[in-house]
Amino acid sequence: MKVASCQRLVISSKPSLATSHQKLTTKTMKIERIDLYHISMPLVSPFGTSFGMQQQRDALILALHSEGLIGWGECVATNDPGYSYETAVTAWHILSDFLIPTVLGQNLEEPEQLSGWLNKVRGHPLAKAALEQAVWDVTAQRDGLSFAQKLAQPYPAGPRERVKVGVSIGTQPSIAQTMDVIAKHLDEGYGRIKLKIKPGWDVKLAWQARHTFPDVPIMLDANSAYTLDDAVIFQALDDLDLLMIEQPLGYEDIYDHSKLRPQIKSPLCLDESIHSADDARLAIALQACDIINVKPARVSGWTEARNIHDLGVAHELGLWVGGMLETGVGRAAQLALASLPGFTLPGDISATARYYEHDIATSFFLNAEDSTITVPTGPGLGIEVDMNRLKAVTLREETFTL
């Protein structure tokens, strides 16, 4: 495959926004230019997991220009290699030196083409997913469809208009303060609570939450903090009627999860272990889980996420869409994925105000009466990016052209 050469320049002016969202008559789109931004924004409140405490979120935002349209993508790699080996710095390197030069000048017809262009780069799913999101966005605009409509084309019922969501609560200074935070989010209208756990911050927390809120769906997320030798901890949670326990064991493990699952009553969910549809097939074959958390960034994008969705539906697994503290750019694409028919469990797609006081794109609000968020229906992602705000939180930016 011939790779187009590209120029790398510091951006000196605001990217021009698409003037029309009308459906284009041609299917082929040349990828003409890509703008890349490294942003950093403070969180509304610190977010604690077994990896540590996060107060500031770095990410990469990508704008792909083609035929007068702009497709937006978000790379969720952040400051440190806790959840993933990728960071914002390494993702910038992979995008700018390998992925962007590969796609510039290519004639794009459909988003499914992208994986074939990028397969010479092994790994780096978070970086790849940013490009793929932008490609889905721009081709949906071309076709006069929303991102959700384009993604749902294989399904006769099409996308759902609203998707069930929950809220993820990081580790707090005390169990009592955790109960206060749960109560606050329930008052806001969230109908499902996820609690982050780690060794020493698990059984007492979960028992207190269940007895304080007996009728609320509660799940626990361990972020790979335990080993198979800790099975007794999860057995101690068997009578709490938990919605699920998410990724208790190693972040690349499937085999030990298959050994843990028969030992506990709570449904077992895999997150970090599932990087592709092949991993999902292995987990299904080993009976390693009841549920899969599908994060499109973790699996290189929305094409592979949809493949995992189809596998999960075929094998009657529970499915939901996970979150990575996305801005409105990434959140809109998450909502599109969550609108597919197989995602029946509430996802981690909280309202904008949960994480950011002033986002860089269209805000999303919770429908408190049924704990849902409305899926955007405008062309592509259906959002507007606030360029002034984007510039204000940008640490570094470059443009890449033919």
Image (cartoon, rainbow, N blue to C red):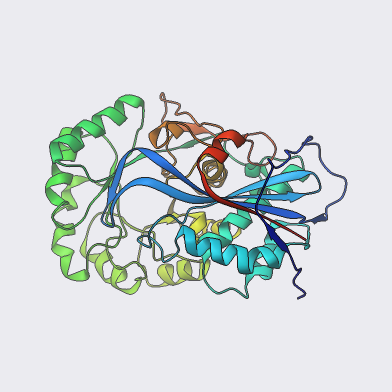
Left/right of residue 109 with respect to residue 281 in the rendered view: right
**Quadrant location of the N terminus in the rendered image:** bottom right
- Provide residue 341's location: percent of width, then percent of height: 54, 46
Regarding residue 385, the answer to whether it shows in the image is no
- Residue at left offset 72%, top offset 40%: 145
- Residue at left offset 46%, top offset 56%: 77
- Residue at left offset 77%, top offset 63%: 106
- Provide residue 382's location: percent of width, then percent of height: 64, 36
Left/right of residue 235 with respect to residue 268 in the rendered view: left
Q: Nearer the viewer, residue 311 or 147?
A: 147
- Provide residue 208's location: percent of width, then percent of height: 13, 40
**Quadrant location of the C terminus in the rendered image:** bottom right
Q: Nearer the viewer, residue 295 or 217?
A: 295
- Provide residue 110's location: percent of width, then percent of height: 74, 57
- Residue at left offset 43%, top offset 64%: 274
Regarding residue 62, the answer to whether it shows in the image is yes
Q: Determine whether 50 is above or below 5 in the image.
A: above
